[in-house]
């Protein structure tokens, strides 16, 4: 019984040192993107529903993306009242990972 308790203790210590298992969200903005943007832009950015831009081929810079996400464009709503500036920057960084 003591050996079992020691084994459980060692495994829990290993878990603590190594950290919790990683979520499937590799980038800070990925969760926000998937929850709020993927319906129109698609999970990998190429859906183009309701006139959404194909983010895989878009080369818009950070400043342009920040303005578009903050203020909206055409049918895309403004997100500045929903996302903080930091969250918008996180989404921008995630969008850039989708580019081909």
Image (tube, helix red, strand yellow):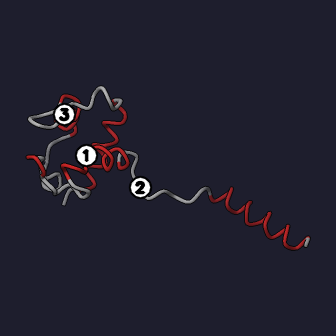
Tag 1, which secondary structure?
loop
Residue 36: x, y in percent? 29, 43
Which residue shows up at 20% across the image and 56% down it?
99
Mark 2 to mark 3 CA distance (whole Å):
26 Å
Tag 2, which secondary structure?
loop
How crowded pointer 3 is (Cα within 10 Å; few <14, some 14-19, many 20+) is rated as few
Tag 3, which secondary structure?
loop
Residue 31: x, y in percent? 38, 48
Sequence-wise, the earlier of marks 1 and 3 is 1
Mark 1 to mark 3 CA distance (whole Å):
10 Å
In which quadrant of the rendered image does the N terminus lie? bottom right
Residue placed furthest toward the top: 81
Sequence-wise, the earlier of marks 2 and 3 is 2
Mark 1 to mark 2 CA distance (whole Å):
17 Å
Sequence-wise, the earlier of marks 1 and 2 is 2
Q: Is residue 22 left or right of residue 68?
A: right
Are the two marked residues, 1 and 2, in contact with CB atoms closer than 8 angstroms? no
Find disc 2 in the rendering and name its residue. 26
Residue 1 or residue 88, whichever sits in front: 1
Disc assigned to residue 37: 1
Find disc 3 in the rendering and name its residue. 77
Which residue shows up at 36% across the image and 30% down it?
84
């Amino acid at each position: 019984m003591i050996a079992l308790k020691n084994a459980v203790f060692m495994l829990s210590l290993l878990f603590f040192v190594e950290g919790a298992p990683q979520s499937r969200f590799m980038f800070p903005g990925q969760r926000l993107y998937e929850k709020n943007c993927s319906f129109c832009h698609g999970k990998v950015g190429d859906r183009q529903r309701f006139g959404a831009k194909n983010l895989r081929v878009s080369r818009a810079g950070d400043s342009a993306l920040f303005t578009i996400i903050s203020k909206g464009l055409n049918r895309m709503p403004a997100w500045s009242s929903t996302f903080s500036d930091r969250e918008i920057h996180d989404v921008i960084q995630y969008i850039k990972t989708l580019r081909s």
